[in-house]
């Protein structure tokens, strides 16, 4: 069955689309406690054609905390075939993200060269999207394989000459690949995984004895510190700290030996993982672990305080937006990122408040945001500028401000709900 047909059929059967988890996704414990409830929402990447507006299903969007392994996670799962079978996210759209990927490729390949390998590095990228990360590895003369579940994005990568399998990575796919890799990369995908443990087994199988698994993930400490609650959505099943990620990896004799905090996406951890005991743990990862401990990050009270901050942020932003509307201001959303839909739907915002969402991604042209039903227009096809841009793509703040100096000088206000 064609995956798009399957997705539409599944969307019509809500009981098939969602399943309540009774046990922790990481450790299997039933000792879970609800800490954040953002209500029922559509899955955020379900951008709609005009004929489908108002027909999208919704699902509970709630975060629970595991008292045994400290993992924050969603308690409902929208099936992976619906969310990832075909979607409109492209990692190559934003220059700052591509620059970040280039840096990660350089540091990963540099570490590989330090091992004095004489052969070409073999790289596997899980959730490789349009191949932007792998292109940077290709530029370093690496042998590259991508695994990407989305039909359209996998096709884009293959057309760019980046060998990409259109599959959901898991243990069975790993067995089919049947090759050892010096570098395995997972950028922004490791917290998406419905088949979490099968994927971990697949990585364990394919990672060379002295290979490195590079995990890039949104850091829950920064999400909390920035009150970036919009990064909670159905695609993001897990919200890792170093402690909770280690709890998962330890089950497969894998361990984090290095990690650092990068600015990308408002604060992401770039962790280097190896077979247990292969490399010594660095001081910088120990310092990050100590910071988690001293800040009480891995406690339920931290998440309950976060929930209160979310409520306060909603009140503040709605006061700003409602006053702007009362003053006759025209407001557009800057960007139509998937995370923006969490915010729009939690705030109950629609096109009466934010008239348009302005995007660069051609795959979202003339679609409508799920739930809030705001039309997406392309940046270079805009007829009229607003008085205010409410910046949903806040994680690219510096790039946005740099690219829009002229508009700012003309008096257009750029309002950032989150300031990383």
Image: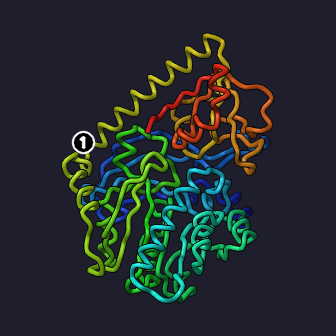
The residue at 65%/24% (across/down) is 331
Q: Is residue 74 visible?
A: no
Q: Is residue 222 above or below residue 277?
A: above
- Counting from the top left corner in percent of width and height, residue 208 is at 43, 85
The foreground one among 174 and 196 is 174
Reply above or below: 152 against 236.
Answer: below
- The answer to whether residue 381 is left or right of residue 348 is right
Residue lying at 48% horizontally and 64% vertically, measured from the top left: 104
Q: Quadrant of residue 152?
A: bottom right
Read off the residue under disc 1.
301
Instruction: Find residue 363 and report its horizontal and vertical position in percent.
Output: 74, 51
| Residue that appears at 36% across and 37% down | 307
Residue 302 screen position, x and y as percent: 27, 42
Camera-nearest residue between 242 and 123: 123
In this view, the residue in front, 297 or 277, is: 277
- Quadrant containing the C terminus in the rendered view: top left
Query: Where in the figure is residue 98, as x and y percent of width and height?
Result: 58, 57
- Is residue 303 rendered to the left or right of residue 206? left
Q: Residues within 10 Å of mark 1 (few under 14, many from 20)?
A: few
């Amino acid at each position: 069955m064609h995956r798009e047909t399957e997705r539409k059929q599944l969307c019509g059967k809500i009981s098939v689309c969602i399943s309540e988890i009774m046990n922790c996704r990481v450790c299997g414990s039933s000792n879970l406690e609800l800490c954040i409830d953002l209500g029922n929402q559509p899955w955020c990447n379900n951008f709609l054609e005009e004929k489908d507006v108002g027909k999208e299903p919704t699902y509970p969007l709630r975060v629970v905390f595991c008292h045994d392994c400290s993992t924050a996670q969603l308690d409902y799962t929208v099936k992976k075939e619906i969310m990832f079978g075909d979607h409109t996210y492209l990692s190559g759209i934003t220059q700052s993200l591509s620059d970040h990927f280039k840096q990660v490729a350089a540091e990963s390949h540099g570490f590989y060269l330090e091992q004095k390998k004489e052969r070409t590095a073999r790289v596997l990228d899980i959730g490789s999207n349009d191949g932007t990360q792998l292109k940077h590895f290709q530029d370093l003369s690496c042998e590259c394989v991508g695994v990407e579940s989305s039909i359209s994005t996998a096709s884009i990568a293959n057309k760019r000459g980046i060998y990409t399998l259109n599959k959901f990575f898991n243990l069975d796919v790993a067995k089919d690949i049947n090759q050892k890799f010096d570098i395995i990369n997972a950028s922004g995908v490791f917290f998406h995984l419905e088949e979490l443990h099968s994927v971990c087994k697949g990585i364990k199988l394919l990672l060379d004895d002295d290979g490195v698994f590079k995990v890039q993930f949104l850091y829950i400490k920064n999400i909390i510190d920035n009150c970036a609650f919009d990064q909670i959505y159905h695609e993001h099943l897990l919200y890792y700290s170093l402690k909770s990620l280690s709890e998962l990896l330890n089950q497969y004799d894998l361990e984090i030996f290095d990690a650092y905090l990068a600015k990308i996406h408002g604060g992401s951890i770039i962790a280097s993982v190896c077979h247990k005991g292969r490399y010594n743990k660095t001081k910088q990862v120990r310092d990050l672990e100590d910071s988690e401990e001293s800040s009480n990050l891995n406690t339920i009270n931290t998440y309950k305080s976060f929930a209160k901050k979310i409520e306060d942020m909603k009140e503040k932003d709605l006061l700003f937006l409602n006053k702007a509307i009362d003053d006759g201001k025209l407001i557009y959303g800057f960007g139509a990122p998937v995370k923006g839909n969490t915010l729009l739907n939690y705030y109950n915002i629609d096109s009466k408040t934010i008239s348009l969402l302005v995007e660069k991604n051609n795959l979202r042209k003339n679609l409508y945001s799920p739930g809030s039903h705001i039309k997406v227009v392309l940046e270079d096809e805009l007829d009229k500028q607003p008085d205010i841009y409410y910046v949903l793509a806040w994680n690219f703040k510096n790039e946005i401000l740099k690219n829009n100096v002229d508009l700012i000088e003309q008096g257009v206000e750029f309002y950032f709900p989150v300031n990383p």
